[in-house]
Image: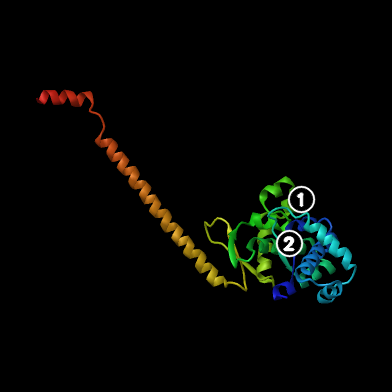
Amino acid sequence: MEELQKRYFQFPLFLLRSLFVDKAKCFNDILSYGVFVFAKNNELDENEISEYFGIEGNYSRAYEKGKAIAEQIPVKEPIPMIDKDKLFEYQNNEKSEFELLKFAVTIGMKSILGTKPYCKTTKEMIFCRAFGFKNMHELEESTPKLFVKYFNRWQTDKILNEIEIENWNLFRYSSKNMRGIYIAKKRKISLEKLIEMVEEKNKKRKIEELKNEKIRLRELALERLNTTTKRPRSDHEATTEQHLK
């Protein structure tokens, strides 16, 4: 078995939609789907799965529940991963609304990153994913009240700052006049390297924009010169020319 599979459960993003409605159901569904996929991919029996993950309860029921969830997954649904220990920590311990949202935001960020070490996104998309929606269109069709409550600059920055300083293996970067933000995995790229790459991209973009602006202004100037050169003679100019003759 691969080390990645040993440490993480996979699950369809839409399961997060019930996190703030029924926490127990949300985590049970995530666990059930994770068990189903892991057992299916590794051809393990009930005892091996239970022993491996240290889980108790009705394995057959969890397997069937996971199978049913698998059949409901929409097309192109993001399939994020969650650390096994984090799952059990949040499932078995009392957590505040803010702590649950912070947990969900980390999953949202990871669902956007996928296997990439870093990528560019927006705070809006991060929180969209945190509430279990793959895009803003889906979110707008059924916007959760907590999204409205927490999606403001003060709250989003507070959550993202805490994620960066805690042990979530994630950080972000943005600079003045940048649209969106970059998010990254700490184990895949350093903050220094990310900033260097982002600013190099910004520099190249600005050079290209300046180049295009010069081309546009040159064409505009030539057009004006041609218009001035080819303008028809006025009656006064024609009369003056006749007198000179």
Tell me whether circle 1 and circle 2 mark residues in contact (CB < 8 Å).
no
Residue at figure coordinates x 72%, y 51% from the top left: 148
Amino acid marked by disc 2: Ala
Rendering coords of residue 194 (x, y %)? 54, 68
Rendering coords of residue 235 (x, y %)? 22, 23
**Which of the numbered marks, if any, corresponds to residue 104?**
2
Q: Is residue 79 visible?
A: yes
Q: Is residue 93 visible?
A: no
- The residue sitting at the front extreme is 43
- The residue sitting at the left extreme is 245
**Across the whole image, how many numbered discs are drawn on residues?**
2
**Which of the numbered marks, if any, corresponds to residue 11?**
none
Rendering coords of residue 107 (x, y %)? 71, 63
State whether residue 52 is above or below residue 156: below
Task: Identify residue for label 1.
Answer: 145
Residue at figure coordinates x 69%, y 60% from the top left: 108
Q: Residues within 10 Å of mark 1 (few under 14, many from 20)?
A: few
**Quadrant of the image containing the N terminus:** bottom right
Name the secondary structure under disc 1.
helix
Mark 1 to mark 2: distance in Å?
15 Å
Residue toward you, 51 or 139: 51
**Quadrant of the image containing the C terminus:** top left
